[in-house]
Image: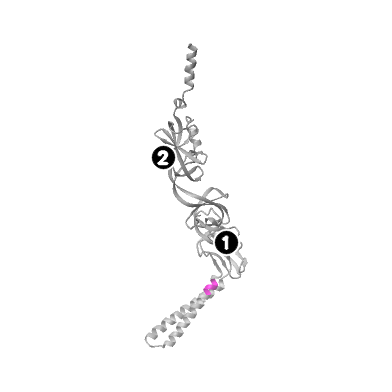
Amino acid sequence: MHRLVLALAASICFSAPAWAQETSQNVIVARAVADRFVDPVEALGTTFSNESVVITASVSDKVTEILFEDGQTVEEDALLVALRRDEQRAALAAAEAVLAERRTAYQRAKELESRQYTTTAQLEERLAALREAEANRDAAAARLADREIRAPFEGVVGLRNISVGTLVTPGDTITTLDDLDPIKLDFTVPAAYLSTIRPGLEIVATTTALPDIEFRGEVNSVSTQVDRITRSITARALIANPDHALKPGLLMTVQLLKNPRSAIVIPEEALVPLGETNFVFLAENDVAIRREVEIGARRPGDVEILSGVREGDLVVTHGTMRLRDGQAINIVKEQKADRTIGRLIDETSTVR
């Protein structure tokens, strides 16, 4: 009889409902936040100088001076190369002397004409002579300028291809000049995005040549034509490049950040999928509340919530596998934006 009572008591204990044996579940939570969210469009692009020119001579003569070093940054109108120019300098000096003489003669004739000591015709002759001298001076200055090769804009010179004493002719490449800040990035996207791509959209670009750096810029312009073969359209972005890290000709992976918006965002690991439906567990007053949610776009580690969660709500990110609606919970850690689940688990040995 005693054994029968013990057996009956044991059977009652083991057949007790699960909720009677259940204890609070340790969990890690994260707070739903309002954050900037975008729909990224990936593309490949190539970098180009903002401005680029091949520096050449316009006349044939020998190089007498080279006033730049390879890779040097130069100002607009900086003198880069001088050709032999003694004759042109002398011609300019003579033209300026004649100009000064005729300017004085004209001023004297103008004073005499005002006192009626000379005729208007004589004054006009002096004026014509002055204009001729000005033209001769300008022509002499232009011939001298042809032998002074200057930078047409501020930029970085490339490798020089000449030496002092080299005889250069029109079309010979002396060096290159590139304006590298900002730098242009041309990329193509399917024409389906034509209605959304526009100047001002943000882009993020990376290159294997500089693997640890993200470059940010904005779309500056969009081509007016769609490629008839690929059905794609070319867009051009500008990227600030003050340290000249980016060079022309680099292949870059581009993310066009279209449709920027403010969205409710939670960690992706908080989602509990069930068929085609998604749920989360909200932490409210130390109780887990299962809530159906509608999700939007995703990005690495995060998901956009369209409905079901409000900003500031606490969602369970770890400990959901054995969690049930209405179960008591014990929050052992709140996950911050810069802390991964793996790191938090390492720090929190009580999570099970």
Q: Disc 1 residue type?
A: Thr
Seen at 49% across and 13% down, the residue is 4
Numbered tag placed on residue 176 in the rendering: 1
Query: Would you say residue 347 sits in the magenta stretch?
Result: no
Q: Position of residue 334 (x, y in %)?
A: 44, 36
The relative height of residue 314 versus residue 108 in the rendered view (above or below) is: above
Q: Give the range drawn in magenta.
A: 140-144
Q: Disc 2 residue type?
A: Asp
Q: Is mark 2 on a helix, strand or loop?
A: loop
Question: Which label's residue is closer to the chain start, 1 or 2?
Answer: 1
Coloring applied to the structure:
one colour
Numbered tag placed on residue 326 in the rendering: none
Q: Where is residue 244 in the image (x, y as percent from the top left)?
A: 52, 54
Q: What element carries label 1?
A: strand
Foreground mark, 1 or 2, reads 2
**Residue sitting nearer the eye, 336 or 15:** 15
Left or right? Give the position of 119 relative to 80.
left
Q: Name the residue under label 2.
A: 313
**Residue sitting nearer the eye, 230 or 95:** 230
Seen at 42% across and 87% down, the residue is 120
Please tell me whether the stretch drawn in magenta is mainly helix, strand or loop: helix
Seen at 46% across and 35% down, the residue is 28
Classify mark 2: residues with Cα within 10 Å, few (<14), some (14-19) or many (20+). Answer: some
Q: How far apart are marks 1 and 2 (CA)?
A: 59 Å
